[in-house]
Image: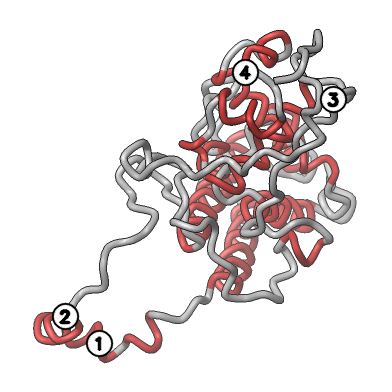
Amino acid sequence: MGAGHEDGTTEGAGAEPATDVPVVDAAVGARDVGATVSGGITPPDHPDDPDLPENRGRRPAERSPGVQSLDAREPLTRERIVTAAIDFIDTHGLPALTMRRLGQRLGVEAMAFYRHIPSREDLLDAVVEHVVDELYADEDVYLEPRHGWQDYLNRLAHGVRRIALAHPALFPLVVTRPPDAPWVRPPLRSLKWVASFLEALLTHGFTREQAVVAYRAYTSFLLGHLLLEVAQRGVAINAVDDPDGAPDGDQADVGTEFPVLVDLQDLLSLDETVTEFEESLESLIARLGTMLTTHAGHL
């Protein structure tokens, strides 16, 4: 090994790429939240989906960025560590992330991280913050309503969906990581975005009670739909999911006990994710509009 640098890099760290870090062994956390199917995220069923990262000039979730070792003279920074951690989780799933494996990816000793990020838990907090902050860089999402509250909610929902599609293995962490304020519900996480949401409604005629009802309904819709969507891409969304899925059942047995399931198999197997998201979002916004105009206190 070459001589060490103060920032934790080693001589020649960037000269000869290290072997890519393997996915965590099946016996170690393969059924944990954020674990992915063997081989990584599965390709989308609707490649023309405008919210997919590849249709917005970004790396597809299922395509590994590969090993990205630091150059010998390239400084180690908090931003580089967090970005590398996000890429690692995108590729290998959340359970596989350790400080040692991340160090291998960057060509440094794990101890070099602790000057910038004290622990893995601090790293996960930083990862969630960084991912949610992608909303600020999304030119189609507004921090305040420019064309009415309906347009604001529609843009924000698609922005959160783009985060889920860009980082499927990370999204379960985004929606389960404790926020700064324990009464705030995911997936917005950022208190600035929660305040933006509530102020957008309060300044457009919603009462305090209606704004909170709207926030709860909106976040419940996003959580439910997007967690199911990333699960379809091969991500475990709770600690008992098997990301590789159970073996296919015997169709004859299924047909004998539940003939209606076999009869409707052609329809049940269709992936209507994009249509369902749009229709459900449209229906939710319409119901919120009805609540506003009728002065109701619930949906």
* Mark closest to the chain's N terminus, 2 or 1: 2
Question: Residue 72 bears which disc, if any?
Answer: 3
Question: Can residue 211 be seen from the camera position used here?
Answer: yes
Dots 2 and 1: beta carbons under 8 Å? yes
Question: Residue 110 bears which disc, if any?
Answer: 4
Label 1 or label 4, whichever lies nearer to me, is: 4
Q: Which element is circle 2 on?
A: helix
Residue 113 falls in which quadrant of the image?
Answer: top right
Q: Please name the amino acid that badge 1 sits on.
A: Val
Question: Residue 98 bears which disc, if any?
Answer: none
Q: Residue at x 62, y 42 (%)?
A: 19
Q: Please name the amino acid that badge 3 sits on.
A: Ala
Label 3 or label 4, whichever lies nearer to me, is: 3
Q: Please name the amino acid that badge 4 sits on.
A: Ala
In the foreground, 77 or 167: 77
Q: Which element is circle 4 on?
A: helix
Question: Can residue 293 be seen from the camera position used here?
Answer: no
Q: Which residue is disc 2 drawn over? A: 254
Q: Which element is circle 3 on?
A: loop
Q: For the N terminus, give its image quadrant.
A: top right
Q: Which residue is disc 1 drawn over? A: 262
Q: Is residue 103 above or below residue 105?
A: above
